[in-house]
Amino acid sequence: MENKARTEELKNFIREHEALFWYSPGDKGETVSDELLVETIINYGNMNNVKQLFRLMGIRKTAQIFFDSINQSERRKNNYYELARDYFTHYFNRYAN
């Protein structure tokens, strides 16, 4: 689910947080899929990072990516920390409808 029309602002956001994408070589971090971007920021970012992601992607799109990911399979569901998965499930159910 890679967004080929990724905005420059979102690419800059990814570059600013490149330490969170340590597994992506050099300049490849900005090419991660939207699914992996949301997962990484929710798992490893702080709340300011999450808020900035919502501003850049939109809370509804972020929620859709999150729910698609955790509903895809048990393996994908387990990629999120349990506390983060539970918190954002409730958060999105309340604020992204």
Image: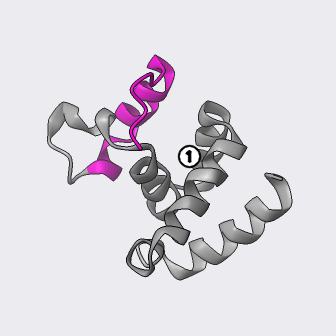
User: Which residue lies under the disc numbered 1?
Assistant: 49
Quarter holding residue 32: top left
Residue 29 in percent (x, y) is at 28, 39
Q: Which residues are magenta?
A: 1-21
Quarter holding residue 61: top right
Residue 39 in percent (x, y) is at 46, 58
Front in this rendered view, residue 21 or 86: 86
Tell me the amino acid under the disc marked 1. Asn
Residue that extends furthest to the top in the rendered view of this protein? 8
Front in this rendered view, residue 11 or 34: 34
Q: Is residue 80 magenta?
A: no
Please tell me which residue is depicted at 63% across the width and 52% down the height of the picture: 64
Please tell me which residue is depicted at 23% across the width and 52% down the height of the picture: 22
Task: Indicate whether 72 appears above or below 46.
Answer: below
- Total marks in image: 1
Please tell me which residue is depicted at 46% across the width and 32% down the height of the picture: 13
Residue 54 in percent (x, y) is at 65, 41
Residue 19 in percent (x, y) is at 30, 48
Please tell me which residue is depicted at 21% across the width and 35% down the height of the picture: 28
On the picture, is 32 further left or further right than 61? left
Main secondary structure along the magenta-highlighted residues: helix
On the picture, is 43 further left or further right than 75? right
What kind of element bears circle 1? helix
